[in-house]
Amino acid sequence: MGTSSDEMQSRWLAVLVACSFLVIITMGIRQGFGLFLLPITEALGTGREVFSLSMALQNLIWGIASPIAGGFADKYGSAKVALVGTASYALGLIIMGSVVSAEGLIWGQLLVGIGLGSAGMSIALGAVGKAVSDKQRTLALGLVTSLGSFGQFAMLPVTQFMMEGYGWQLALIMLSIISSSMLASCFVLHRQLKKEEQASTAKLASLSVRDALDKASHSRNFILLTVGFFVCGIQIVFIGTHLPTYLQDSGLDLSVASWALSMVGLFNIIGSFMAGWLASYMRKSRMLACIYLLRSVVMVGFIMIEPTPLSAIAFGAMMGLLWLSTVPLTSSLIVVFFGPAFLSMLYGVAFLSHQVGSFLGAWLGGWIYDHLGSYDMMWQIVIASGLFAFVINWAISEAKPPAAAASKQPA
């Protein structure tokens, strides 16, 4: 029995590491794309809207690919889907670095979007969600999100170093080579989740994907959760794509922007883990509402003062605490409402809404800048959307978590 327990723990740790590595690479490289905005725009001789449109399309394709890839992963295994995603991601980076044109940029970002949907967060969360018990699930989802967030902290300085030392084109080729290392995660998932996913496939044979989608589409809670996730996409992609340029327009060096985004990744490790832990004692929907409200408060404070290196880095740290902490809460609420069987697919559906918001966050930021000459209106939009998301998530109906209810019972 001890050996069996040791084997289960070993398998869980292997799945956690493999899924965390997928998120580290996919999110870490992607988060650095904002550093390429100015050099690529200068090479193409266009305004910022072209780069913003490519990022917007990447986010939209990422969202569309996520429920489709999630459905295949739920049915046929995470490793096979992640393998396709790894190849697409690496190829997209090669095209971006070697084809210097608007078409090359857009096609490269489209392939990166497919890679993100097939080897990124939704696939990783689905695999982890199936590998752990109900009691450990929220904490585990928070843990893989927080460990994956290390990629943003680690990859941004690496990306900047490669750009400064070798130029933006060769930097993209080198990032493509790095992304190929995700093949190791695919191999580990195939080895460690083979039995679990075979059992899951047998169970899903008696269930209908259409029934699961129909149930979700008629769920008030799921609709509210999905609408709130739309706002999350607007906020984080606008900041991730346009914060470096906003800071450079304010007279700050690119290295300041790089460190500000690195602080987002570093403090997101803390924020995501804390969200997963606190969800055992608090209502997840109320936590989500407060996260969106606090984001708006932090953004108001940031834009009210002239940006400095200290304020930029402090902003990155505070936003980091609130960055991907929405992910374990959102995915855990989906399990609360529908169970873990179709977690990858239903999270992918909610994530599609997130990515529609991401499309607007990336593209609208560039469009507003090109037409108005500043980001002021876009900051106002993302702040107002946070207040809207606060109201939406507060309206979700959710029972108190067992841990919180137990703590209030008399001894």
Image: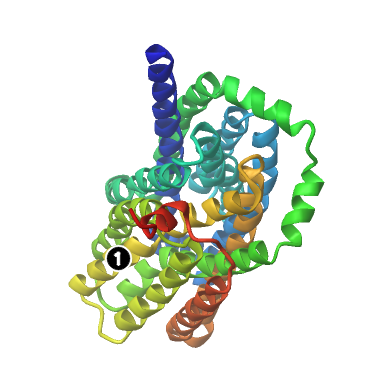
Q: Position of residue 245 (x, y in %)?
A: 37, 70
Q: Residue furthest left?
A: 310
Depth check, front residue: 378 or 188: 188
Q: What percent of the width, then of the height, locates residue 216?
A: 72, 56
Q: Residues within 10 Å of mark 1 (few under 14, many from 20)?
A: many
Give above or below for 119 relative to 394.
above
Residue at 67%, 48% (x, y): give it.
Answer: 67
| Front in this rendered view, residue 100 or 223 | 223
To which quarter of the image does residue 267 belong?
bottom left
Left or right of 227 on screen, residue 379: left
* Residue 155 falls left or right of residue 127: left
Tag 1 secondary structure: helix
Where is residue 142? Give x, y as percent. Answer: 41, 48
> For the residue marked with disc 1, what is the amino acid?
Gly
Q: Where residue 251 appears, x then y in whole percent?
A: 26, 76
Q: Is residue 117 left or right of residue 157?
A: right
Residue shown at the point (32%, 51%) measured from the top left: 269
- Can residue 102 be seen here? The reply is no
